[in-house]
Amino acid sequence: MLRLFGLSAVLFIAMGSVALANPPLREWRDFDDDVLLPGATAVCGFEIRGHFVGSSHFTLYYDKDGNIVKEVDTFPSLKVTVYRPGTDQSYTSAEPAVLIAYYTNNAVVGSTATVFSAGLFERIPGIGIEGGRIEYNAVVVAIDDAGVPLVQFVSPISASGPQLDQPIRFGRCAFFQ
């Protein structure tokens, strides 16, 4: 009986320390954004645009002191249509993916992060596919209104899976040639 009480006390203390951590912040977004794709536009010499449609789910995790330590983002329904305005040239690619970021220094602007992305990033008909798993060094460049850090990828660390032979801007441009 004493052993059972001791085990119960240990479990109660352990579970209590988990309960002290702040609950995760969860944010859902639907988006429908049409943007200039500056890399492909520069390579092609004419305007290339991307129309991104879908939903995303962001979850931030905190340590017991309330510091942001991890983020998990999912993009279950993301699709992009890449097109050349004024023509009927376009392609659409499903881009389901997950992104996981590990933050330093409470994810304040200027702090570093390691970011893993896995999924289908883009299928360019007749050119190839960009997908798999990519790991990046990143830096926090801003915090959105909900408190979610926005990062800029600084340099790739590793990649596995299908990759285009060149950066995606070249593949996008090759499609329109």
Image: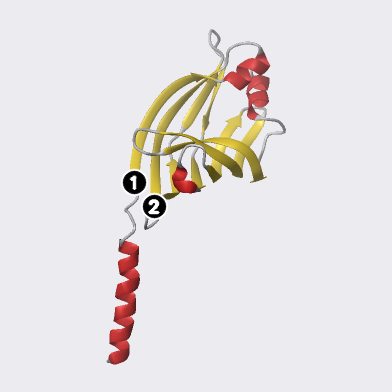
Residue 125 occupies quadrant: top right
Asked if the residues shown at circle 1 and circle 2 are in contact, with their CB atoms under 8 angstroms apart, the answer is yes
In the rendering, at what x and y percent does residue 43 appear? 67, 18
Q: Nearer the viewer, residue 170 or 26?
A: 26
- Can see residue 155? yes
Q: Nearer the viewer, residue 177 or 144?
A: 144
Q: Left or right: 176 with respect to 112?
A: right
Q: Left or right: 92 with respect to 2?
A: right
Disc 2 secondary structure class: strand
Disc 2 designates what residue? 62
Residue at the spot 62% in from the left edge and 21% down from the top edge: 39
Amino acid, disc 2: Tyr
| Quadrant position of the C terminus in the picture | top right
Residue at the spot 72% in from the left edge and 33% down from the top edge: 165
Please give the label number shown on residue 34: none
| Quadrant position of the N terminus in the picture | bottom left
Amino acid, disc 1: Leu
Q: Left or right: 157 with respect to 148?
A: right
- Can see residue 160? no
In the rendering, at what x and y percent does residue 62 appear? 39, 52
Marks 1, 2: nearer the viewer:
2
* Residue furthest bottom as drawn: 1
Residue at the spot 34% in from the left edge and 66% down from the top edge: 17
Q: Counting residues from the N terminus, which is met first, the one under dot 1 or under dot 2?
A: 1
Disc 1 designates what residue? 25
In the rendering, at what x and y percent does residue 66 appear? 36, 52
